[in-house]
Image (cartoon, helix red, strand yellow):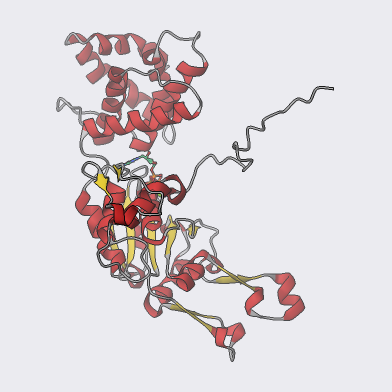
Amino acid sequence: MTTVTVTDPATDPAGQPARQVLPAEEKYAAELAFLAAHDHGPRPPGWALTPSAVVTFVCGSDGALTLTPARRKGTGLPASLTVSRKFVGERALVERCVVTLAGERGLLLVGEPGTAKSMLSELLSAAVSGTSELTVQGTAGTTEDAFRYGWNYALLLAQGPTPQALVASPVLTAMRSGKVARIEEVTRCLPEVQDALVSILSDRRVSVPELSGTPDATVPAVPGFTVIATANLRDRGVSEMSAALKRRFNFETVEPIADAAAETALVRERAGSAVERAGAAFGVDDAVLDALVTVFRDLRSGRSAEGWDVERPGTVMSTAEAVQVASSLGLARAYLPGTSADALDLMPGHLLGAVRKDDPADHARLLGYWDGPVRRRAEDGSALWRRLWDLRENLR
Ligand SMILES: Nc1ncnc2c1ncn2[C@@H]1O[C@H](COP(=O)(O)OP(=O)(O)OP(=O)(O)O)[C@@H](O)[C@H]1O
Ligand SMILES: [Mg+2]
């Protein structure tokens, strides 16, 4: 009898369940271990790295960093390593974020959707605390328990309120262990729920009245504890946060990527790795990616690269969305090679999918962009824009 071994695509070669996305601390574990060994300045209490190593982790190193033989001894670390740039943007912004956290103040990252607020919060917490997983996702249904604690009802009924029956929230766990708690989309939570954070950030302790009279009646925050929250400017306003809560955070605004070439390079890299993860080669030309990013930037800013006015759609034309469209073009080339001449032919259809989301008038705005900048570039003699102009029919 022959035995057939079937490899389960849901497990990796070690038999572990595979994961679609690894948390930053696992994805970049080698860089974090290297930086911990490399940098030996003073660290704020509870920090896994020095503040300057945290900035290097997020913004990348200028060339390769080297480890002395003494520091490498017995660690299994390489002699040198170049730390990759993960966040594309102002280094000064990242430095301000790190200083805020070093002072154990709350950090609130605000900005348009898709500007890498969540990514930055994940990278910072992974570098500072070694974990990015103490996270609360704010929604209209988030209750105070998500910031404080709940109960295991079976144990509560059997034993009454005991420390064992208490279920700590990610924020309470971060307080106990001196780590960074992440609160995503804090402004989506109801104001009275947000206000639970005021006392946590000022008193730095949570009281558990059900355990009063026992040593567990108060959970104090240990050094290192702080909070990184994110808020999307398109959601219910940051302005609606209570003044008391606002005062407990340092606000940092994360802007879309300023430089076109840097944005194109990021889109190429992220879309390329998405397609390579699918086991295929990334078959989208640089010229097509340039055009795609140009369209996104023009529609986002309301002004073309040449300075012509463009009517902005209601949808945010974020870098994250540009990565999605570029990945779709790459995946279509990889999986459906026979159906289309090249990625450029597919671009209008995918763009329409990205633009036409909230407002039906956005379709007309995209057509207006075609009749304006796309046509003018075609008339100026660019072969690529000429082909895009000829594909206007695909926007119907
Ligand atoms: N400045 C940037 N540097 C690096 N990557 C970026 C940048 N801007 C956007 N991206 C890309 O966009 C993706 C999405 O970012 P992320 O989800 O963190 O955005 P966000 O600001 O939290 O959006 P939302 O407001 O919708 O939650 C990132 O994973 C990355 O691929
Ligand atoms: Mg986010």
Q: Residue at x 56, y 71 (%)?
A: 149
Give above or below for 143 relative to 27: below
The N terminus: image quadrant:
top right
Q: Residue at x 41, y 77 (%)?
A: 204
In terms of image quadrants, where is residue 4? top right
Q: 197 and 3: which one is in front?
A: 3
- x then y, percent, for residue 394: 41, 14
- x then y, percent, for residue 249: 32, 66
Q: 231 and 152: which one is in front?
A: 152
Give above or below for 102 relative to 137: below
Q: Residue furthest left?
A: 307
Q: Is residue 15 left or right of residue 284?
A: right
- x then y, percent, for residue 208: 56, 81
Q: Residue furthest bottom?
A: 213
- Residue 360: in sight, yes or no? no
Give above or below for 32 relative to 308: below
- Number of marks in the image? 0
The C terminus: image quadrant:
top left
- x then y, percent, for residue 202: 37, 77
Q: Residue at x 31, y 13 (%)?
A: 388
Q: Residue at x 61, y 40 (%)?
A: 14
Q: 175 and 235: which one is in front?
A: 175
Q: Is residue 269 left or right of residue 17?
A: left
- Residue 264: in sight, yes or no? yes
